[in-house]
Amino acid sequence: MKNIAVLVSGGGTNLQALIDAQKCGELGSGQITCVISSKADAYALKRAKDNFIRTKVLVRKEYPDIASYSAAMLDALREADADLVVYAGFMTILDSQVCNAYPYKMINVHPALIPSFCGKGYYGLKVHEEALRKGVKITGATVHFVTEECDGGPIILQKAVAVRNGDTPETLQKRVMEEAEWKILPEAVRLFCEDKIHVENGIAVVDE
């Protein structure tokens, strides 16, 4: 059994997708054992508590800098005995001390087809606003390993989503979540927990 720690900052819809997958036995040998939030009022905490998952709050603004916050997060992850760390709408970029402690053991879901619309500053609705501004016809979501480079880690899974005439950032965001994020994030977690992902020369290879 692999212990999964999920990092959140907001509503927790991706966390809910993971919880639902777990209830259906779709996380392989993985079990969500801890949810850590960067905000005390994040609705994701209620989702965790409603499902009897241990929670912890580490408020970013209570720490003087990212180094001290990252150190506190690392302590929390070690306390949780985490085998896998999942970013599920977690809005803080942690520094290298966390990435170095969990090499290829941290994954994130990004609401675009990396390398499009990614990197620092591309999060939430901003991603979809830029996709619409550019007039792309296909967008989607990407699950990737977390490294020091924002959205730059090896890509594990991607799923495309069509952009429709008349889309707003809100409608596109909803479709990307429903058709892509909520599907490929639990799938990537399952693959990790079943030891079916390995990295070769900086590229993630899925064994099935």
Image: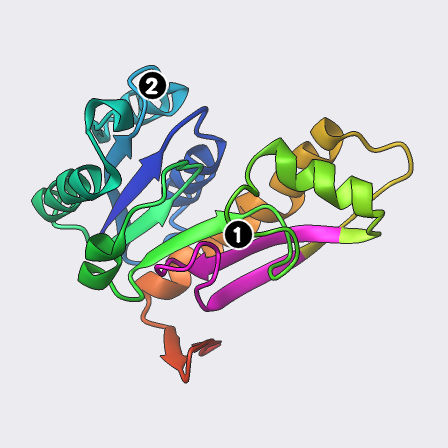
How is the structure coloured here? rainbow
Q: Quadrant of residue 188?
A: bottom left
Q: Position of residue 12 (x, y in %)?
A: 43, 29
Q: Amino acid at mark 1?
A: Gly
Q: Nearer the viewer, residue 2 or 145?
A: 145
Instruction: Tell whether position 49 is magenta.
Output: no
In the displayed structure, does residue 24 sit left or right of residue 68? right
Q: Position of residue 73 (x, y in %)?
A: 19, 41
In the displayed structure, does residue 32 sit left or right of residue 19? left
Q: Residue at x 91, y 38 (%)?
A: 165
Q: Nearer the viewer, residue 23 or 44?
A: 44
Q: CA distance from mark 2 to mark 1?
A: 29 Å
Q: Which mark is residue 42?
A: none
Question: Badges 2 and 1: C-beta atoms under 8 Å apart?
Answer: no
Instruction: Tell whether position 151 is magenta.
Output: yes
Q: Is residue 1 at all visible to an observer of this figure? A: no
Q: Which stretch did the figure color magenta?
A: 139-159
Q: Position of residue 19 (x, y in %)?
A: 38, 37
Q: Residue at x 31, y 62 (%)?
A: 193
- Residue at mark 2: 46
Q: Which mark is residue 119?
A: 1
Q: Quadrant of residue 113?
A: bottom right
Nearer the camera: disc 2 or disc 1: 1
Q: Is residue 168 at all visible to an observer of this figure? A: yes
Q: Amino acid at mark 2?
A: Lys
Decide: few, some or many residues near mark 1? Use Cα within 10 Å; few <14, some 14-19, many ≥20: some
Q: Position of residue 124 (x, y in %)?
A: 57, 34
Q: Secondary structure at mark 2?
A: helix
Q: Nearer the viewer, residue 146 or 179?
A: 146
In the displayed structure, does residue 65 sit left or right of residue 183? left
